[in-house]
Amino acid sequence: MEAPQSAGQGPIGRVAGNGRVRAVSGERGPVDGRVERGNQTRRMVLQRAAEIASIEGLENLSLGRLATELRLSKSGVFSLFGSKEGLQLATVRVAIKFYLEDLLNPNRRIPDGVVKLWSLCESWLQYSKGRAFPGGCFFFATAVEFSARSGKVRDLIAGTQREWITHVEQMIERAVAVGELVPETDGAVLAFELIALLDSANGTSLLHDDDSAYTKASTAILNRLRSASTDKSLLPQAV
């Protein structure tokens, strides 16, 4: 999954494993005090925005609410984002940065193959189970919320989801290319199956407050990958 063009417009922040937004390092050098204070306020606002959006949805974000909760001036918050849509887009970009930095990038260090694919799925399950966002997977929630809408926010969410699907499909194709998945593997179908299991674990766990969904999903994913693997010794026998 490559970063959408709109997600690369400078350091915004990222959501840490405890659901908090952390600063992302930018260029070194002298920083104007007012600019830095503005950046700190922006990160603080996005921290709370991400928390709210993951539970209540992006539509429940408002500049006024955030200003009141964080004891900031409404005009100051407005100047950072310009509109509710601007706030929503910035919040989605925070989630994208987390995906890239804490979920996808670490797995890029693993050589192409079935182990890398398995590791990515396990990382995703930990991302959801660990409540990097208080409401589970940010994109699972917002994709449902905006699936029947139109506009820039929906386009950004849809584009990010497409890139995630493409990323998984490409990992499968590479695993086939290196001979670790059987040649007849349909990358699009297998990616659909794996992502469906990940999403199901996330949704079931949240709705029923039952983390056993993650073990079930992990077991199902492992069994599916083992069934398509040319060398089952590359994968664990059980979770």
Image: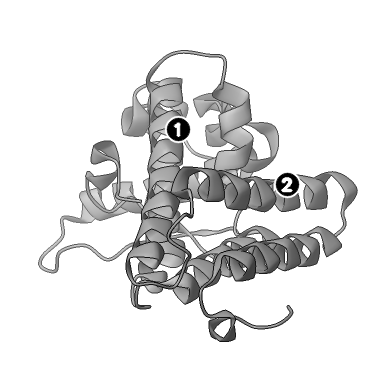
Q: Nearer the viewer, residue 44 or 182?
A: 182
Element under label 2? helix
Q: Amino acid at mark 1?
A: Ile
- Give the vertical position of 74 relative to 8 (above or below): above
Q: Quadrant of residue 19?
A: bottom right
Q: Nearer the viewer, mark 2 or mark 1?
A: 2
Number of numbered discs present? 2
- Could you say where residue 18 lies in the image, as x and y percent from the top left? 61, 65
- Give the vertical position of 38 relative to 61 (above or below): below
Q: Amino acid at mark 2?
A: Ser
- Could you say where residue 179 lies in the image, as x and y percent from the top left? 38, 72
Which residue, given by chain and number where applicable, does mark 2 sit on? 200
| Residue 157: numbered disc | 1
Look at the image and tell me in which quarter the C terminus lies. bottom right
In this rendering, does residue 1 appear at all?
yes
Lower sequence index among marks 2 and 1:
1
| Residue 238: numbered disc | none
Q: Nearer the viewer, residue 42 or 157?
A: 157
Mark 2 packing: few (<14 Cα in 10 Å), some, or many (20+)? some
